[in-house]
Image (cartoon, helix red, strand yellow):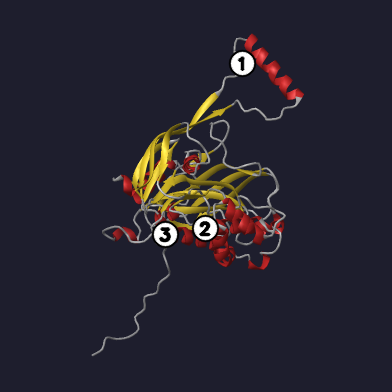
Amino acid sequence: MSESNLAIRVEGLGKQYRIDSVRERYQTIRTALSRGVTNVVARLAGGGGRKDQYVWALDDLSFEVERGTALGIVGRNGAGKTTLLRILSRITAPTKGRAVLSGTASALLSVGTGFHPEMTGRDNVFLNGSVLGMRGRYIREKFDEIVAFAEVEKFIDTPIKYYSSGMQMRLGFAVAAFLEAEILLIDEVLAVGDTAFQRKCLAKIDDVAHHGRTVLFVSHYMAAVSQMCTRALWLDRGRLRLSGDTASVIEAYLADSAVASGERTWSDENGARQPGGDRARLRAVRIRNAAGVPSDTLDVGKPFTIEIEYEVQKLLRYSMVYFTLRTNTGIAVLTSVDAYDGLVGEHGREPGIWISTCTIMGNFLSQGTYYLDVIAAHPLVEYLFSEDAVLSFTIEETGSVIGTYDGEWPGVVSPALPWSIDRVGDPPR
């Protein structure tokens, strides 16, 4: 690949962080004395005090990106995806190696950076745009488009502190979406707004990607990566696991990430940190067959259940738990939410252990392998936990009418829909 056709070259890139040695910038006398005593006791015990520990967020990472390429970056939480974008955007310096970008670059790593709560939405558009590197004249030219995209026209002269979290995120994305740069670095931004606005965000990113600009797109939404990106990288614990065409990378990533056992648990006992924060944490996900037994192999003709167990630590109002089923190419088959009737949102979820269970009827999914994403969210505001490809399972043909068809049955779903067959007359003479 010629140098003139390269937008990004990464060579031996590494980023190391020190852990277990964080010190507050300002310490109380009590804290300082406590730490001093701890270190003295450790030395007397022969431990030599606390030793710094290090972790490589990225390690010996090398790749090249041609101009005009839309490159998807996939990997589980902690794989180094965001660290890579922070280095490419010059927010973070690498520990070793180098990253060379040919052309102007803009990064969309977090929406709403630079907002001031006492200023109006109008003033914050100009402030936020300036933070992201826009010129004042360009912001004025694009102002009406930005406000319309964010859907906050009625509130544009209201102080931002009176906006909901969702409104602030929409306005932040709208400003960033109109950045003009040769290279665009985009971290996970699909938590912004409702489903309709997420589709609008994807369409805007897709438009950028298909107009000759180079895009690096980090997302847990495999269908979005499949739709927008021609190539993909799979990062695993800071290293490049696989690079190639998007479909091949996604299929390999999903197959590796999912647990094929019918059950996956997170607990201190098994060393798996529970996904989530101080409001809710994911404890377990189970796929139970028609007999109620966790299984990763299911009969096409029988129902099965998806069971999501989680711990609520603080009262949740207007929350929902849901899942997305995907094919082995990352295409979403369906998404189902446990709060369709509004009762959960109305009554909330008290602190405690909860289980949300969904039943999927028999003769619904076609035979094949599927992957399960699990999410809990405060709608339009934030994700409480989000884990992609937590489990995989296989639907097997066991002798239904589909089994008489010699070949692969077309389609993702194959419901046993009601039909009638009636003789309505004699043949013409």
Q: Which mark is residue 177?
A: 2
Q: Nearer the viewer, residue 424 or 324?
A: 324
**Residue 161 locus on image (x, y percent):** 71, 55
Quadrant (top left, top right, bottom left, bottom right) of the C terminus: bottom left
The residues bearing labels 1 and 2 have C-alpha atoms spaced at a distance of 49 Å
Q: Nearer the viewer, residue 147 or 283?
A: 147
Q: Residue at x 57, y 35 (%)?
A: 267
Characterize the local packing of mark 2: few (<14), some (14-19) or many (20 or more) Cα atoms within 10 angstroms: some
Q: Are marks 3 and 1 in contact (CB under 8 Å)?
A: no
Which image quarter: residue 9?
Answer: top left
Quadrant (top left, top right, bottom left, bottom right) of the N terminus: top left
Q: Give above or below for 303 relative to 88.
A: below
**Residue 198 locus on image (x, y percent):** 53, 59
- Would you say residue 17 is visible in this rendering? yes
Q: Are marks 2 and 3 in contact (CB under 8 Å)?
A: no
The residues bearing labels 3 and 1 have C-alpha atoms spaced at a distance of 63 Å
Three-letter code for the amino acid on which mark 3 is drawn: Asn
**Residue 291 locus on image (x, y percent):** 48, 48
Q: Which mark is residue 363?
A: 3
Characterize the local packing of mark 3: few (<14), some (14-19) or many (20 or more) Cα atoms within 10 angstroms: many
Three-letter code for the amino acid on which mark 1 is drawn: Gly
Residue at the extreme right of the image, as rendered: 29
The earlier-in-sequence mark between 1 and 2 is 1
**Which callout, 1 or 2, points to the residue nearer the camera?**
2
Q: Is residue 351 left or right of residue 355?
A: right
Q: Give above or below for 80 relative to 200.
A: above
Three-letter code for the amino acid on which mark 2 is drawn: Ala
The residues bearing labels 2 and 3 have C-alpha atoms spaced at a distance of 43 Å
Q: Are marks 1 and 2 in contact (CB under 8 Å)?
A: no
- Would you say residue 166 is visible in this rendering? no
Q: Give above or below for 415 relative to 83.
A: below
